[in-house]
Image (spheres, rainbow, N blue to C red):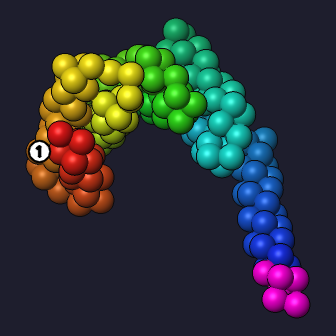
């Protein structure tokens, strides 16, 4: 009887989770169909990718890539030459690149992940988007901590990854303190702590 109860509870939780995701996806697709501007469509592609990110990362990657492609299209021939519009698309490009990097990291494609993080960081630095810069610092630091945990590394390689992790996590903490972004500061501090645990 106890086993039946536990199995029933698990099935109910799974159903609620799947139903909730489908409901959210339906809502996002409805918004997408109504969207009049590409900035909104790009944000929706990113949101749709986010729904899939932890359960179907290949599908998330498809939507993040669609966001990136639409961003590139608009940057190549912007609907207006106003700097705010170009900056908005550039910021969305940085976000798309970072999200693609996150998926690659989750799939253990570390070289690709770092490539996308660095592309995102470059754009964020050009735009002086401090929140984007912090997110990249945290992602790069965390990824290097993960790389340092590989058993196939020499001690020198491991320390190199850990030094990079400490460098980026420290930069993240410093910047979050300047912009007073407490949740991000905690993330950066956790990344730094994890790097020191491996030392």
Q: Quadrant of the C terminus?
A: top left
Q: Residue furthest top?
A: 76
Main SS of the magenta segment?
Answer: helix
Q: Is residue 43 above or below residue 73?
A: below
Is residue 3 magenta-colored?
Answer: yes
Please tell me which residue lies in front, 165 or 15.
165
Residue 90: quarter of image = top left
Q: Which residue is mark 1?
A: 174
Residue 164: image location, x then y, percent: 20, 27
| Residue toward you, 164 or 26 | 164
Within the image, what quadrant is residue 157 found in? top left
Report the side of 165 relative to 85 (left or right).
left
Q: Residue at x 38, y 29 (%)?
A: 150
- Rendered view: 148 above or below 74: below
- 107 vs 11, left or right, is left
Figure check: 130 above or below 77: below
Q: Secondary structure at mark 1?
A: helix
Magenta-drawn segment:
1-6
Quadrant of the frame with the N terminus = bottom right
């Amino acid at each position: 009887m106890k086993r039946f109860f536990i199995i029933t509870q698990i099935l109910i939780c799974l159903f609620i989770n799947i139903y909730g995701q489908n409901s959210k996806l339906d809502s996002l697709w409805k918004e997408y169909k109504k969207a009049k501007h590409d900035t909104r469509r790009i944000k929706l592609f990113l949101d749709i990718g986010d729904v899939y990110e932890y359960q179907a990362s290949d599908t998330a990657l498809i939507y993040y890539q669609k966001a990136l492609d639409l961003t590139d299209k608009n940057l190549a021939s912007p609907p207006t030459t106003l700097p705010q519009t170009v900056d908005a698309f550039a910021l969305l490009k940085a976000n798309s690149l970072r999200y693609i990097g996150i998926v690659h990291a989750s799939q253990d494609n570390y070289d690709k992940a770092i490539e996308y993080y660095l592309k995102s960081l470059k754009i964020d630095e050009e735009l002086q988007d401090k929140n984007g810069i912090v997110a990249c610092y945290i992602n790069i630091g965390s990824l290097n901590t993960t790389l340092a945990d590989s058993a196939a590394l020499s001690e020198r390689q491991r320390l190199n990854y850990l030094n990079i992790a400490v460098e980026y996590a420290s930069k993240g903490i410093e910047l979050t303190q300047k912009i007073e972004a407490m949740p991000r500061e905690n993330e950066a501090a956790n990344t730094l702590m994890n790097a020191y645990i491996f030392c």
